[in-house]
Amino acid sequence: PVFAGMNGSAIENFSCMIYNISLMNCTWQAGRDAPGDTQYFLYWQNLRYDDAMECELYIKDENGRNTGCRFQNVKIATEKAYFLVNGSSNDSLIQFYDEYIDLYKI
């Protein structure tokens, strides 16, 4: 598949950790070739029946760029969760990153 956007602009090193049963942190790094004004937005879908929701509590770096998300009241189900991180920049199109993750395996 051909993804619109500049090569190297999608996030890297996406990972999630669950702790205290219902809290989840997901983090990522900005794409190494992403323009300096790139801002990233995380959407996720817990179960296949839920609507996709945007992160409510972003973790920001010193430049105010979103580099993670804190989730509360996460339900650990056997179905996969779908994560999508897209970005926006005034300079160029930013590639998106997506992944299906089994929450109960985290």
Image (cartoon, helix red, strand yellow):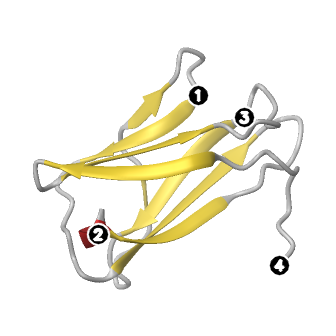
Which quadrant holds the N terminus?
bottom right
Can you identify the residue that label 4 sits on?
1
Q: Nearer the viewer, mark 4 or mark 3?
A: 4
Q: Which residue is mark 2?
A: 105
Q: Give the x, y percent position of residue 2.
A: 87, 73
Foreground mark, 4 or 1, reads 4
Is there CB contact under 8 Å for labels 1 and 3?
Answer: yes
**Numbered disc 4: secondary structure:** loop
Name the residue tied to disc 1: 65
Give the crowd class for mark 1: few <14, some 14-19, many >=20 residues within 10 Å: some
Say which amino acid is labelled 2: Lys
User: Which kind of residue does numbered mark 1 sit on?
Assistant: Arg
Q: Earlier in the sequence, mark 4 or mark 3?
A: 4
- CA gap, disc 4 and disc 1: 28 Å
Residue at 89% x, 35% y is 91
Q: Secondary structure at mark 1?
A: loop
